[in-house]
Image (cartoon, grey):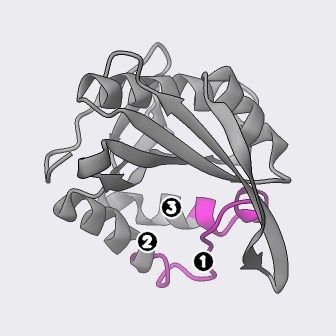
Amino acid sequence: MKSTVIPELKTERLILNRIEKTDHTNIYHGLSHPEVIKYYGVSYTSLEAVQEQMDWYDNLEKSGSGMWWAIREKTGLNFMGAIGINDYQKEHKKAELGFWLLPEYWKKGYVRESSQAIINYLFQKGLHRLEAYVEAENSNSSKALVKLGFSHEGRMIDAEIKNDTYISVDIFAKINPDN
């Protein structure tokens, strides 16, 4: 996953393309929404502060340590959320998957559809292991990962502090059967 152009991927209902500067407001809308950030590790309270996230996306791409896509409806190109990988480790052929959707798009199969496109792309590029870390209380994301063929590998008890409270984190992984 060396520094490369993020390819546009298409599914039956979606277009996945690079997060651009023009998505700044979209990213803020998602990462400041109380329902989205309830189980997400990043949140912002101002439009200006979200520049940190935009810089993070750019730095992942430039360093070759990850890539993130905007999830858009094929018709109308409405912004729906974001999906991507970070913590790419070339020597181990593994990376961490992350995603989030705006609530109006929940429970319609968009996470599964966009994730499958990303997984197919990454596995074709030689990735061997894809990991996902999910707050233990986030049953919807856990269910989505299981439907995608991820295995639940365990739970890290009191692994992080969020809002002054210890949270446990489940780890899921999917292995490329062809690599």
Judging depth in this view, the residue of 92 and 105 nearest the camera is 92
Q: Position of residue 176 (x, y in %)?
A: 41, 24
Query: Which residue range is magenta in the image?
Result: 29-51
Q: Quadrant of residue 65?
A: bottom left
Check contact, mark 2 vs mark 3: CB within 8 A.
Answer: yes
Where does label 1 land, which residue? 44
Whichever of labels 2 and 1 marks the residue nearer the N terminus, that label is 1
Q: Residues within 10 Å of mark 1 (few under 14, many from 20)?
A: some
Look at label 2 and name its amino acid.
Gln
**Mark number, residue 27:** 3
Q: Quadrant of the C terminus?
A: top left
> Does residue 116 belong to the magenta stretch?
no
Disc with the residue nearer the chain's start (2 vs 3): 3
**Whole-percent x, y for residue 115 in the image:** 51, 30
- SS of the residue at dot 1? loop
Tags 2 and 1 touching, CB below 8 Å: yes
The secondary element bearing badge 2 is classed as helix
- CA separation, marks 2 and 3? 8 Å
Q: Which mark is residue 53?
A: 2
**Label 3 Cα neighbours within 10 Å, binned few <14 / some 14-19 / many ≥20:** many
- Mark closest to the chain's N terminus, 1 or 3: 3
